[in-house]
Amino acid sequence: MSRPDLVVRGGEVVNADSIVRADICVSQGRVTALTEPGHAPSGNDEVDATGMLVLPGGVDPHCHVGFTSGEFTTLDDYPAATRAAVHGGTTTIVDFGIPTRGERVVDAVHRQRAQATQGFCDSALHACVVDWDESTGAQLDQLVGEGVVTVKLFTTYRDETMANEETILRTMKHLSPLGGMVYVHCEANTIVEDTQDQVARSGDISAGHHHETRPELAESAAVAAVLALAEHAGAPVYFVHQSTPEAVALVEHARSEGRQAYGEAVVHHLTLDESEYSAEHPERFVCCPPLRSARTVQGLRSKLLTGGVSTIGSDHCCYDTEQKLLTKHDVRSMPNGLPGVETRLPVAFSEFVSSGLMPVTQFVDLTATTPARLNGLYPRKGLIAPGSDADLAIWDPEATATVGTSTLHMATDYTPYEGREIRGLPVTVLVRGEAVVRDRDFVATGAHGQFVPATPLWDVVRAG
Ligand SMILES: [Zn+2]
């Protein structure tokens, strides 16, 4: 064997279905071999992973970068978002090309894609369809050819990104034969708006009442409706940020009938509850769907642990407190979303793996392997095996930290997890064989991020 560029020696190599102690040889950005410990040849560089877990770098299936919604734009760009991502062990983000008013679907994607090379890790993209018109089908054909095979649709946010049922159905029917899949934000807008009206009439629709304005029923109703459209279209479907056990159960049921239906949970819905809306900074926790009751959070966690959820995403939206405060008196005009690309893996690892609730293999499956698979990035991403990109998160399962804004790298002034004690942290992070974080220090010599074209999801579309 020729001398590898890099050898990661002596760690426990974790994939979604296995844990083996092995040395990992890396050349030209890819894993070239896994050998028994001590059997790898000397590399030009070496990383000692003794006592560490070596995980596939995280794949965040849901990450907004420099996202404009209404009056507000999130505060990061590719350098900032990906620098934060790699500090948290994530090496691929999937961002969104969401059209501003009048912008074409392809142009929104190209606008985001142009920034990929400014990143410190790799990225892929979801497109977004708001209104189906006679040009949309050809635009989707073009995008699938360019490696964008997933399309986001929203059932809420009237006059912004809301798509009607006809648009959702047409997008499903067009994408599915191309090996593409829709990603749907499900909250029934009619129920949301009527509930908002009721809360507003009661005299206070400020951030402290956010959770009252978007009921769980709105989510279940929209999931049921979109599942029906997907069944009619014979199309696969992915539900972003599922926040209730009832919504997850609808998707599980469809899957049990052999349909291709997948659900994502995000870390804040799994680890925070609506009590934040009566605490000191309710505005910082305004996101859609909102944080739910403690009972609902327990139910969602049970669904996660019993395999009802397919992926864990961040739904990273990097607003700061000042932006959140501007329209705090009326949640209908507030910027929605929480920062989370950096905390996704450490908070979830601590909460579920360190606590003994979840095997680390399942953690890898939820945070890297299945996100890669459902985004057409597998086996290049989400797997440690010969031929895969050498995206590695070398993880100290015993390291402890207190989460705090001062030690994080996201372009905002707060974290929803301030003060939380966590166990298990990435120590060294490689992107295509290059160390970007080493012994917790940022050591990237420049931005080497790439846009990773997704391949059609034939295994997803045809499975079952
Ligand atoms: Zn989102």
Image (tube, rainbow, N blue to C red):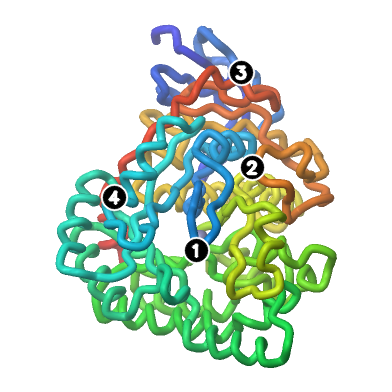
The residue under label 1 is 70
> What separation in Å lies between label 4 and label 2 (alpha carbons)?
26 Å
Q: Earlier in the sequence, mark 3 or mark 1?
A: 3
x, y percent for residue 121? 49, 33
Disc 3 or disc 1, which is closer to the eye?
1
Label placed on residue 47: 3
Q: Amino acid at mark 3?
A: Val
- Crowding near pointer 2: few (<14 within 10 Å), some, many (20+)? some
Figure quadrant of residue 11: top right
Q: Amino acid at mark 1?
A: Gly
**Element assignment for label 4:** helix
Label placed on residue 411: 2
Q: Looking at the image, is 38 positioned above or below residue 343? A: above
Contact between labelled residues 4 and 3, with CB atoms less than 8 Å apart: no
**Element assignment for label 2:** loop
Q: Name the side, left or right, on which 36 lies relative to 255.
A: right
Q: Earlier in the sequence, mark 4 or mark 1?
A: 1
x, y percent for residue 110? 31, 44
Contact between labelled residues 3 and 2, with CB atoms less than 8 Å apart: no
The residue under the point 48% across, 44% down is 93
Q: Earlier in the sequence, mark 3 or mark 4?
A: 3
Label placed on residue 111: none
The residue under label 4 is 107
